[in-house]
Image: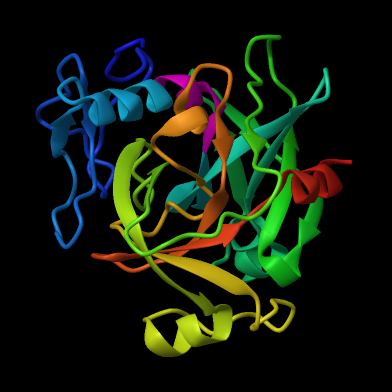
Amino acid sequence: MTEISTYRSDTVNDIGGNRCPKQPAAGELPIMELGQMDPGCNYKNFTGTDEDKQVLNLYNLTRPSTVLFELKSQGQTIGGGTGVMVKDDGNSCKILTDNHVVSEETRKKHNIDEIKAVTADGTAYDITLHKAKPEKDLAVVSIKPKSDDICHPIEFVDSERQFQPGDKALTFGQPYSSGSIYVSEGTYSSSLTRIDASRQLRAEKPPADDDGNRKLDRFNMRAIRGYSGGAVYEPSGDNASAGGVKAIGVVDLADDMSTMLMTPVTSAEVKDLTD
């Protein structure tokens, strides 16, 4: 297994976008810890146990595929999101994220006049909406990479995972508009509908075009705002082996301390959104 810390182009910032006074050492990654309200800049060494090394290896494999979204109003960054590359069309790269990250409704609601997709090398790209599936809060946007080595698509599982309480998952996402990728680890607790999520958690009601009865998987995990659209993975088994990385869904909603809600996504849904 390859063991690295962060990509050379990454600078770790806190959730307010300020550079952390200490940057990660070799083998360390920035983390969001379950039940904590820290502003970021905490690190974990992932070179100890085999399970930790699997997380570090998964980060190494998926970091080139992970995209950050900058949402700006009058030149000021006022929000963020996360996404993952899912198809290389040669002259364009398609990125899966949540519809609420890039939708026209979001633009109007928050007076957003610019959304950029930032790739692992730090380049910010204009985005074009390719296709949306608002009833499941999913969307695919495209960028035009400046070189052939930018687009690194990730595959998704063929069928939805059936979790048991305690099953582990993790995601790599951008806390708020930090401009940095953090690791969040957690365990499955239950499933619920989107409308129940808005009742039980501090979540906004689903938009009119969002299916309130769709299923979400609930994890005990700190994956805060800005993680929306980030791919979720299982940390062990075939999904963490070289060449076998498959995501199981994307982050849909999260609170600030202890709950992440995942939208299950399959390879067939990705194909439909990218065709």
- Is residue 165 at least partly visible in the picture? yes
**Horizontal and vertical percent position of residue 97:** 62, 49
Q: Is residue 214 above or below residue 32?
A: below
Q: Residue at x 65, y 83 (%)?
A: 213
As rendered, which of 248 and 63 lies closer to the eye? 248
Q: Is residue 172 magenta?
A: no
Q: Is residue 204 above or below residue 88?
A: below
**Horizontal and vertical percent position of residue 176:** 36, 53
Colour scheme used in the picture?
rainbow
Task: Classify residue 178 as left or right of residue 122.
Answer: left
- Is residue 122 at least partly visible in the picture? no
**Horizontal and vertical percent position of residue 253:** 46, 66
As rendered, which of 263 and 17 lies closer to the eye? 263
Q: Which residues make up the magenta segment?
A: 60-67
Magenta part mainly helix, strand or loop?
Answer: helix
Q: In the rendered view of the protein, which quadrant contains the N terminus?
A: top left
Residue 112 appears in which quarter of the rendering? Answer: bottom right
Q: Residue at x 27, y 31 (%)?
A: 51
